[in-house]
């Protein structure tokens, strides 16, 4: 009973910032970190805080326990059989998913164990993802009578349409090498090398101009789902403004002068 009470009082999301890397860790590992209303609210608040943290250059999204995230809390969802509650829950979750793309810092998912349903969605909405070789991914809602409609939004923006429909219609699990081949993750490594692989991404990003990285990330998502001409309009305007940034001048001068660049503050 005491252990259960301690778990209930523990933060849903742990936050740690060191050397320019903010690590947000889902902290209900005993239950595979379900996206309950409380977990969604905690993650939402953590993302808001890190967005204002000028010392954070990269965000790592990790998880405690045996798996990354099993998706929404089915017991909680069944306990609220009213449309208003369900709408509010999905609206809150969708805001969190969008915030991952709106953060000025790149977000790297550190995936181990399972990432299913909304947990798979969470991986898909991060900018980069590194998975342990034993990780598994699925959109299994159809198996319990709930089509993974909202997870499909993110997953279908990562992988080909027929691959996404295969996951949605069969509910079958794919392994980490398949997730890599399909484009859901960037790297697959042995579990013992997971932190090192995440750190390689983080170190590479931290070496770049934070101003330019934030500008480029924002433009990437703005243009992604537009028509070709409109996308080029957005991208061209951003690049024109980018070239007037002090870090662009510094970067080009450093390249031409064959010296390392010295970036300005974020």
Image (cartoon, helix red, strand yellow):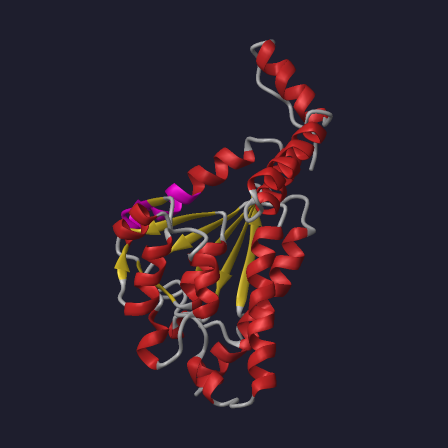
Instruction: Specify the segment rendered in magenta.
Output: 188-198
Q: Residue at x 33, y 56 (%)?
A: 162
In percent of width and height, residue 105 lies at: 59, 45
Left or right: residue 25 compared with residue 257: left
Residue 179 shown in magenta: no
Residue drawn 43% across and 88% down? 1
Residue 41, by quadrant, is: bottom right
Q: How many marks?
A: 0
- Residue 191: x and y, percent? 29, 51
- List x then y, in percent, for residue 163: 32, 56
User: In this picture, is 193 found above or below 204?
Assistant: below
Query: Residue 257 or 151: which is nearer the viewer?
Result: 151
Closer to the camera, 158 or 12?
A: 158
Which residue extends farthest top? 257
For residue 66, say whether it is visible: no
Front-most of residues 162 and 91:
162
Relative vertical location of residue 247 with respect to residue 2 in this rendering, above or below? above
As displayed, is residue 111 above or below residue 1?
Answer: above
Image quadrant where residue 227 sits? top right
Q: Main secondary structure of the magenta part?
A: helix
Spot occupied by residue 225 in the image (x, y as percentages of width and height): 55, 49
Which corner quadrant holds the C terminus?
A: top right
Taking 75 as reference, is 266 left or right? right
What residue is drawn where x is 65% and y is 43%?
55
Q: Is residue 70 visible?
A: yes
Residue at 31%, 77% (x, y): give it: 143
Q: Nearer the viewer, residue 180 or 253?
A: 180
- 195 is within the stretch colored magenta: yes
């Amino acid at each position: 009973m005491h252990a259960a009470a301690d778990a209930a009082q523990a933060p849903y999301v742990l936050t740690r910032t060191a050397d320019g890397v903010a690590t947000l860790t889902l902290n209900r590992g005993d239950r595979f970190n379900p996206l309950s209303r409380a977990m969604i609210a905690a993650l939402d608040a953590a993302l808001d805080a890190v967005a204002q943290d000028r010392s954070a250059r990269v965000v790592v999204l990790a998880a405690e326990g045996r798996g990354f995230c099993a998706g929404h809390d089915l017991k909680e969802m069944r306990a609220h059989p009213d449309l208003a509650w369900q709408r509010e829950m999905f609206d809150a979750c969708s805001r969190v998913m969008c915030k991952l793309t709106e953060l000025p810092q790149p977000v790297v998912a550190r995936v181990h164990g399972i990432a299913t349903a909304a947990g798979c969605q969470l991986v898909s909405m991060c900018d980069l993802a590194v998975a342990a070789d034993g990780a598994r991914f699925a959109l299994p809602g159809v198996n319990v009578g709930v089509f993974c409609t909202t997870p499909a939004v993110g997953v279908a923006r990562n992988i080909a349409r027929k691959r996404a429909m295969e996951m949605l219609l069969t509910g079958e699990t794919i392994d980490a090498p398949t997730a890599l081949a399909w484009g859901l993750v960037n790297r697959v490594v042995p579990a013992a090398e997971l932190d090192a692989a995440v750190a390689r991404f983080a170190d590479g990003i931290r070496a770049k101009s934070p101003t330019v990285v934030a500008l480029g990330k924002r433009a990437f998502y703005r243009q992604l789902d537009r028509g070709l001409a409109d996308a080029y309009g957005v991208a061209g305007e951003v690049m024109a403004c980018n070239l007037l940034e002090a870090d662009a001048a510094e970067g080009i001068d450093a390249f031409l002068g064959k010296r390392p660049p010295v970036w300005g503050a974020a």
